[in-house]
Amino acid sequence: MNLLLAVLTPFLGAILVAWVSRFGRAHSAWAAGGVAVTALAWLLPILSEPFAGVTVVQRIPWMPAVGLDLAFRLDGLGLLFAGLILGIGLLVILYARYYLSERDSLGRLYAYLLLFMGAMLGVVLSENLIQLLMFWELTSLSSFLLIAYWRERDLARQGARMALAVTGAGGLALLGGILLLGEITGSYELSVVLASGDVIRAHPLYLPTLALVLLGAFTKSAQFPFHFWLPHAMAAPTPVSAYLHSATMVKAGVFLLARLFPALSGTPEWSYLVGGVGLLTLLIGAITALFKHDLKGLLAYSTISHLGLITLLFGIGTPLAAVAGVFHIINHAIFKASLFMAAGIIDHETGTRDMRRINGLWQFMPFTATLAMVAAAAMAGVPLFNGFLSKEMFFAETVDMAARMHLGWLLPVAVTVAGIFAVAYSLRFIHDVFFNGHPVDLPRTPHEPPRWMKVPVEILVLLCVLVGIFPAQTVAPILTVAATGVLQGPLPTYHLAIWHGFSPALWMSVIALIGGIVLYGARQSLFAWYDRHGSRLDARRVYDALLRALLAFARGVTRLLDIGSLQRMLFLFLSFAVLLGWIGWSGGDASLTGSRAMLPVDGVSLLAVFALIVVSITVVFLHRQRFTALVLIGVVGLVVSLIFVKFSAPDLALTQLSVEVVTVVLLLLALYFLPQHTPAESGMARQGRDAILALLAGGGVGALAWAVLTRPYTSIGDYFLANSVPGGGGGNVVNVILVDFRGFDTLGEITVLALAGLAIYAMLETLRLDAPRQDADGRAWNWDMHPTIMASFTRLLLPLALLVSVFILLRGHNLPGGGFIAGLVTAVALIMQYLANGVEWTHSRLPGNMHPIIGAGLAIATLTGLGSLFFGYPFLTSTFGHVHWPLVGDFELASAMAFDLGVYLVVVGATLLILIHLGLMHSKTGDVLNLEKREQP
Amino acid sequence: MEALIAISIGVLTACGVYLALRGRTFPVVLGLTFLSYAVNLFLFSMGRLSIGQPPVIRAAATAYADPVPQALVLTAIVIGFAMTAFVIVLALKARAELGNDHVDGVEQP
């Protein structure tokens, strides 16, 4: 559990810090620091296990049947990374406290930072690969938030978007790679995958798997040609850069290389792909870094270059190279974090990052300058500092590799060139910033930063020196355990020492140092050359062009499918449906008519269906006269409810009848605001075409209905019929299905109803419509809207109607009725009041605000369902019993009745909400008209 | 009797399709109303037709109609009303915003 808690702590802490930040900056800094320390504390009890050679695996079964567990793993590699993430994270939290100005929200930064920290911990501590990928994607998302922290800045948003696009695309590729790994090995557990290296390498899918995994790693670690996002991510606040680009985000990619090293490495494909990309990135990063005038730009390209170096080491593929790779991961994290922090201090104190203006800072901040110079020397690979040790191991490995390759001597030459440039840009960081004359036109006069802002840099620089001078006493144990974690086996012999004798690697270091100094001396002419030619090489242009092409493609597809006309699209859609139906039909050879015995036809039914057909066709022919069509469609609805009555569906008949009333009222209210006639605009051809399609669709659906109706079948209905009384305590099976067996569906349906009502309310709220002055034939409206007789009768009828609805509601469990029907009856009764007496009159006497009623209905229905949880049953389990009431007699009570009450309230509320607000629009416009009428005479 | 219902469903569908293909919002809403009648009847008829056998448990009854399609159609009728209301208010909104009641928002030339 410790590992799970360690990963979860930063996620929960992010919420805590966001809340604490309201109490002040110091509080949020302490809270964020406390969260990081807590996460570290969870790891402490199991910290010694990897040193004893034990891999800790903790799992919580989630879906064991498909091999998905929440599984965490702590081995040497995970331990090293967890230490870097939490340790440097703590320093960054301290540093950010002083870096960020009062205007910026410290709480938000810390919350994002902790989210990111949790995601990174998840990546390095995952045992399950799918789970690793989830955290991997979370690092992309949370780094997006971090880079876009200054969200009002264009560059920050662009940089964040670019980082997300590139790393997110890589994450997709990685998902593919992980799925293939799972297919090959039959498991997503790292323990299995790491042990199946031979199986994976021999598998025909090895190359695609490798390519996909590498795409994920290379995009994350900013390897060529995906490196361009990293410099743009420098728009983030400097503490973020110090965290993301030293120890965490970009290291996730090389972490993946190290993690899957035993499973994927050891083939020529691995060496050429990983080694080749690493070498290219190393060179391009190192050369470009020298020409960046922006302090953080220089560090960004140097980061790219060092990531390339690490990638190249893993690409070489020997165990010793992997050890060197791990060693450089540690060293780079330490010196690069301190360099970013130093750059942040300079930026903070001078107000600019342009090295052409920042000069001679030694006289203003000698202490910071010393720290920065030590870190830069480590970056250059100067002896006595940590960077030198891993860099010399790196040189030695390339020499070793060269002996095994055709044209191998090119490799040491290329990396020496990269070394020369590394020395040159490190020298520039030192000389150009702290010496080289005087500052040019700085916005602020620089001085030493606050005491505690320097502490994180001091700690890191101290580590650089300690590791550089006493490697065996400091870094050796953690390096051993981490390298064991990478190789998953015995380590090669190596010696961490400053002096290895006059080896080729030493000469390469010497050449790099001298060459770098010479190169830096000649910088002015190089800068001029770069400004003329070099700036043309920008991968960002490719990215932009690709993005433009993608957007154009998406627009093209949209244009192809969305032709902008509902009529044409609907025609295509329906034609396609008819075509599919025809294909399905013509495929089989079953006869249209089945074997089921048919019911005899009686005269009344014949007459009713005849009426239905005649009226329907009349509606179509008269549809341009809208009022007539609307009245006639009421007849259709009536016949449909009669069909329900005839064929044993009393509940449906009641529902259809009451819905018919509210629908016609609704359409009448709406028609007031719409033209009374439809203009004749379809030509004969279009009408004919539509008619043919309508006949085909109608014929098809009719034939299908016929085919079904004449065939025997078995139904699950028997189960409900048998269990309705014993299981649901109700005789009306339809109602018991609604409120009991399928209560969850009904809960969803009344939620939809409530949402539809609220959406309509929202649309009507801001709607302003012009009411017509007269009807279609030019007659003015009759203002005697509320005839006395109708008004009187509806008032008398209201209590009766409400009584009926209560009756229907209560008996619904055993006889036709229930919440839906009762709700509609109530709604109709109340709408009658509005129709007969006017909106204002009714509004002043009845509760007009329907939102609480809808809310109460949903709450009652949901709480009834939750109530069964309370008694230990699944959601919405119902119960029932009988009580004896004096006078009334034996009376059944079921918990489902409370649920039905919820249904009732939602139906009443939503129906009235819709109709009242549509009616209120009338009174708004009606008032205007009344006013005009009064003014006229 | 089965033939009558099948024909009714076919006619309602045909009328619904034709009206749904019109160019103004109000006929389209009428068309959708027709289609919901047709679909509800079609779903209901999946339980086959039976006369005088409502699915209400009684001692004297020998057979019952299939309650499952009825339960499905009951909620479908109510939701159908909500959707009709939504579409018609959308049509009002469109008219207010666009100044006409054509389904594509532009008067045909």
Image (spheres, coloured by chain):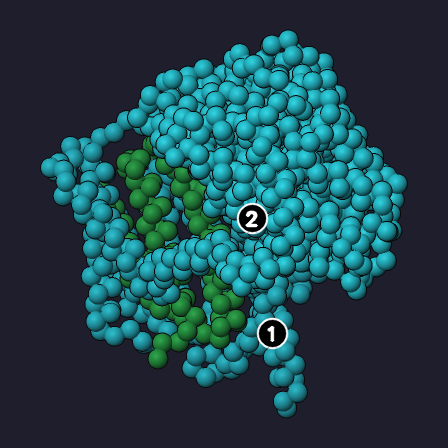
Q: Is A364 displayed left or right of A221 in the figure?
A: right
Chain B color in figure: green
Which residue is disc 2 drawn over? A287
- Amino acid type at mark 2: Ile
User: The N terminus of chain A appears in which quarter of the rendering?
Assistant: top right
Residue A903: x and y, percent?
Answer: 56, 40
Image label count: 2
Q: Answer above or below: position of A709 versus A104.
A: above
Q: Which chain does the residue under circle 1 lie in? A: A
Residue A874 in sight here: no
A808 vs A442, nearest the viewer:
A442
Residue A529 in sight here: yes
- Amino acid type at mark 1: Thr
| Residue occupying the point 58% across, 77% down | A783
- Among the 4 quarters of the image, the one containing residue A74: top right
| Residue occupying the point 41% across, 23% down | A266
Q: Answer above or below: position of A799 versus A454.
A: below
User: The C terminus of chain A appears in which quarter of the rendering?
Assistant: bottom right
Residue A536: x and y, percent?
Answer: 50, 60
| Residue occupying the point 22% across, 47% down | A580
Distance from label 1 to label 2 (Cα)? 74 Å
Residue A759: x and y, percent?
Answer: 56, 55
Secondary structure of the residue carrying tag 2 is helix
Which residue is disc 1 drawn over? A925
* Mark 2 residue crowding within 10 angstroms, few (<14) / some (14–19) / many (20+): many
Residue sticking out furthest to the bottom: A937
A540 vs A297, nearest the viewer:
A297
Q: Which chain does the residue under circle 2 lie in? A: A
Secondary structure of the residue carrying tag 1 is helix
| Residue occupying the point 56% across, 48% down | A287
